[in-house]
Amino acid sequence: MSCITRYVLSELFKAFALALTAMTTLMVMIFLVQEAWREKLTATAIFQLLPYTLPTALCFAIPGTILFAATVVYGRMSATNEVVAVKALGIPPLKLIIPGLIFAFLMSLLTVYLNDLSVSWGRRGIYRVILHSSAQSIYSMLRAEGTFSKGKIYIDVDEIRGQDLINPFIVRQDDNPQNSLQIRAERARILVDPVEDQLVIQLLNANIMLGNQVKSWIDRKDFPIPLGDVTKKSGVADSPSNLSLREMPEELATQQQLTDSQQQALALKLVSQVVGGDVVGLTHPQWGADLYQLEKGIFREYRLLAEPWRRWANGFSCLCFVLVGAPLAIQLRKFDFWTNFALCFIPILVLYYPLLMFGVGQAKSGDLPPISVWLGNVVMLLLGSSLVRKVQRS
C-alpha cells in the first residue's frame, strides 16, 4: 500500500469515525426518546432497547457521514494545494480518489449487512421489549387504578392476586361496533407470546359477547391481543420490509404459490357461475372481497421482489455519495467543510432521493421491474464518473 493511499485512508477514517460517533449517538437518543414518549416505556425498557436501535441508527448515519468525511478530507486537500502538489509529481488525482472509493465500497457492504441485521435482529428485539413492557404496564396500571385503557383495549378488574386478574371486564373495540368484543371472566392472566407478536389473556369461566349478542360461554380460553391494539406498533412478521434477505426467497415462493392458487380458484368459480347461469353469484359482493384479497397478494409479491434490490441500493448509496462528493470537493477548493458538504449534498438531495423514491414506488406497484430501484444509484454513478474525468483533465 502506497503512502498516498495510507494517508488518504487515515484521514478519511478519522473524519468518518468522529462524525459517525456523533451522528449515531444523536439518532439513537432521538429514537429512544421518541419510543419512550410514544409507548410510555420504563427506564429499564429504554436501556434494553439500546442495542437493538444501533443497527438502524448506523444504517441511516453511515451514508451521510461518509459523504461528510469525503467532503472534509478532499476539500481540505484541495484548499491546501495538496492535490496540486500530487499532480506536480506526475501522479493523477484519481490516485487520491481511489482509496476513498475503496473505503466507500467496504462501507456499502457493511451498510447492506446492518440493514439486514436491523430487520432480522434489531427490529424484532425492539418489538419484544415493547411487548414485555406493555404487559408490565398493564399490570402496573391495573394495580394502581383498577383499570387500563389504551388503543383498542379496555380492562377493568376488582383486584389482582399475584398475576391473576379477579373478575376482569375486557373490551376490544372495533371500527364496526358489531365486531366489538366484551368479555367478563372469573379470572384472567396476561402472558406474552413473542413468537406471534401479541399478548395473550388466559381466561377462566368467561362470557364473551360479540356486539350486543352473547357469543359463547367458555371454561378456559386464550384470548390473543395483537401488539398494535395496545401500542402504536403493528406486527413484524407480515411486511416484506420486516423480513431478512435470507427469508425472502422462501416467502416469495410461498406468496407466488398462494397467488396462483387464488387465481385458479377464482377462475374456476367464474367458469362455474357463467356456465351455470348464476347471475346472482356473478353480481354478489363477495367477488369484490375475493378480488381485493388477490390484489393484496399480488402487491405483496411485487414488494417481495423489490425489497432486496432496495436494500442493496440503499447500502451502495455510500459508494455513489463518495464518487460524487470527492471530485466535487476537489473542484470547489474550499477549506470550509460545512460549505463543501452542503454544496456536495445538493445534487444528492435533488437527484438521488427523488429517483430512489420513484424507483421504489414503481417497483412495489409492479409498473417497473425491481431493478428500477437502482435508478438513483445509476444517475449518481454517471454524475460522479463525469466529475472524476473533469478533475483528471483540469
Image: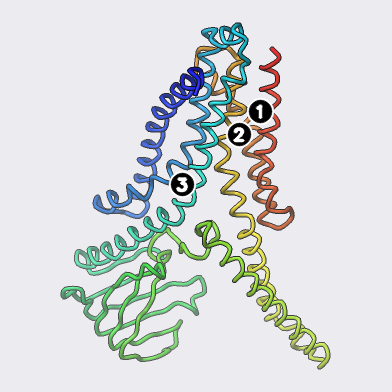
Residue 249 in picture, x, y percent from top left: 58, 63
Q: Is residue 80 above or below residue 110?
A: above
| Lower sequence index among marks 2 and 1 | 2
Label 1 sits on what residue type? Gly
Q: Are marks 2 and 1 in contact (CB under 8 Å)?
A: yes
Identify the residue shown where x is 26% and y is 63%. 136
Q: Secondary structure at mark 2?
A: helix
* Disc 1/disc 3 C-alpha distance (Å): 25 Å
Identify the residue shown where x is 66% and y is 71%. 292
Which residue is farthest left?
A: 161
At label 3, counting other C-alpha atoms closer than 10 Å, the crowd grade (few under 14, some 14-19, many 20 or more) is: many
Q: Is residue 232 above or below residue 71?
A: below
* Disc 2/disc 1 C-alpha distance (Å): 7 Å
- Dot 2 corresponds to which residue? 320
Question: In the picture provided, is 245 more to the left or to the right than 206?
Answer: right
Q: Is residue 338 visible?
A: no
